Image (tube, rainbow, N blue to C red):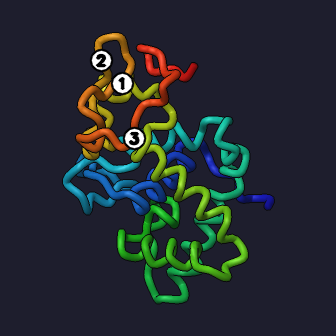
Amino acid sequence: MPGDEVSEDEQTMVLEAFADTILPGAKRSPGDRAIAGVSATPGAVAAGALTLLRTPATGVTGGLEFLVPALNRHAEEHAAANGWALDETVPPFVALDFEQRCSLVLDLTAPGNPERDGWVALALFCNMAYDSAAHLPTAEAVASGHPGLRAMGWAAPDVDGLWRFPDYSYRRAVADLHPGTDRAGNPA
């Protein structure tokens, strides 16, 4: 809609606030407004949610120019409906506190909301950045101490960058090898 254009800085701040609502993290500095700081550990933003959201292969990148202004409009409407005052020095969604952001995101992702699919997709990519480091090669993410993979205890690869599990991931063989399997583990 005309007049809904947002600067790249505002888009970044709003997307960071959304990602932090989905998977909260620690504030980067005392004055950090996008990250609410309800967690002492790194969350979606530190895990690279914005990098993933801005990766064209995700399919959501083109919609960000519409989703960010829509999120701000919804924040204004949600605040007005609940009698919450917004700090006008930051984008409306960023002006909401953590509980208020959660309340709005719950409404946006609720069954029956006609915009639900867009908000759920945005939330899924925020989770994906943390859970799988989808924007990075896995070996690189592990080597750099990616917060999500580190929190899950993701094992480092072998020296050659490949993962092998000589002790089995379940600590026991779950099936016999096919008789045609070669020494490298490839089927014949």
**Which of the image's four quarters has the C terminus?**
top right
Question: Label 3 vs label 1: CA separation?
Answer: 19 Å
Q: Position of residue 18 (x, y in %)?
A: 48, 59
**2 or 3: tag closer to the N-terminus:** 2
Q: Residue 89, located in which quarter of the rendered image?
A: bottom left
Do the numbered discs 2 and 1 sit on residues whose CB atoms are within 8 Å?
A: yes
Q: Position of residue 141 (x, y in %)?
A: 37, 28
Q: Mark 1 sits on what residue?
A: 163
Compared with 7, 86 (above or below) is: below
Q: Mark 2 sits on what residue?
A: 158
Three-letter amino acid code at disc 1?
Trp
Q: Is residue 45 visible?
A: yes
**Which of the image's four quarters has the N terminus?**
bottom right
* Secondary element type, mark 3: loop
Nearer the observer, 43 or 4? 43
- Foreground mark, 3 or 1? 3
Q: Is residue 157 left or right of residue 104?
A: left
Nearer the observer, 133 or 60? 133
Compared with 63, 166 (above or below) is: above
Q: Quick one: which residue is furthest to the front in this view?
A: 179
Label 2 crowd bin: few (<14), some (14–19), many (20+), radius 10 Å? few
